[in-house]
Amino acid sequence: MALRARLTQIWAYGSILLVLGVVLFLFVYVFAQGAGTISPEFLTDMPRGAVLGMEGGIFPAIAGSFAFTLTAIVLGGIPAVAAALYMVFYCKSRKKEGLLRAVIQCIAGIPSIVLGLFAYSFLVRDMGLGRCVLSSGTALAVMILPFIEVRAEKAFREVPLQVVQSSYALGCSRCHTILHVVLPTCRGELVSGIILGGCYAMGATAPLIFTGGVAFAAPPDSLLKPAMALPLHLYLLVAQGSTSLSTAYGTAFVMMAVILLSNLLATLYAGRSRHR
């Protein structure tokens, strides 16, 4: 038993070191390839060049990515948390719970490019919204809804039952208990799950191709306008061939850094809130 436990420990630590090594290698390699491109001007300028993106910067793509992501978080996070609350505190029927869980699992299994095609057919074409941030944000919201719902439901189920029952025993209503006991207790996990869902949306390319991502646009000032996005800009740079690879690596590093930083902030916030 001692040998088995020792081997399991070695396997676990080895796996952790392998994952960290792969992540570190990716960041170092991408940074090394795009180091000549990354600069303050690269982060703040508009793209330029005979082949668009070879020169200038990626500021409109950064602004567009945040616009798409924030729209997706609002449109997907609110129904995801509401569904998790219903599953944990209101749903008393196993059939309804099973049906809702099956729907969420089915949504999670839909390929992102299919969501983009659906959003194009329904929002862009049939509803007449056109290619815009709102259309893309809606497609991304559907994509991240199961991701956030699963984490929110897990957080709600981990609230000590004694705390909830004590609130009921004091005469507090279910709504008051949720607003003043459950949600503050789970605040860290909820914020963390929503941020991680936003990171998931920020890296998606397929839904943007059909719904609101474009090769060139000014930073968006309206939800009804199209915008650039980092993953789509990266895809277009790579498609142009070797002439734009340095800029592509610079764009990739910026996107990786933003997502990694967001993940670290979400993890730290969740840990701090759990400690409190």
Image (cartoon, rainbow, N blue to C red):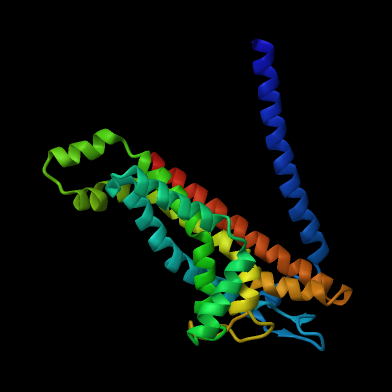
Residue located at (20% from left, 49% from top): 174
Residue located at (65% from left, 76% from top): 209
Q: What x and y, as percent, mark residue 134?
A: 49, 78
Q: In this view, does 59 lie to the left or right of 157?
A: right
Q: Does residue 192 appear in this view?
A: no
Q: What x and y, as percent, mark residue 107?
A: 52, 58
Q: Is residue 22 above or below residue 128?
A: above
Q: What x and y, as percent, mark residue 41?
A: 69, 78
In this orientation, which residue lies closer to the viewer: 131 or 164? 131
Q: In this view, does 210 lie above or below 147?
A: below
Q: What x and y, as percent, mark residue 23?
A: 72, 48
Extreme residue in the top direction: 1
Q: Locate the N terminus and report the quarter of the image it occupies.
A: top right
For residue 112, what is the image quadrant?
bottom right
Residue located at (51% from left, 72% from top): 137
Extreme residue in the front direction: 95
In this orientation, which residue lies closer to the viewer: 40 or 73? 73
Q: In this view, does 25 lie above or below 167?
A: below
Residue located at (64% from left, 17% from top): 5
Q: Does residue 264 appear in this view?
A: yes
Extreme residue in the right direction: 242
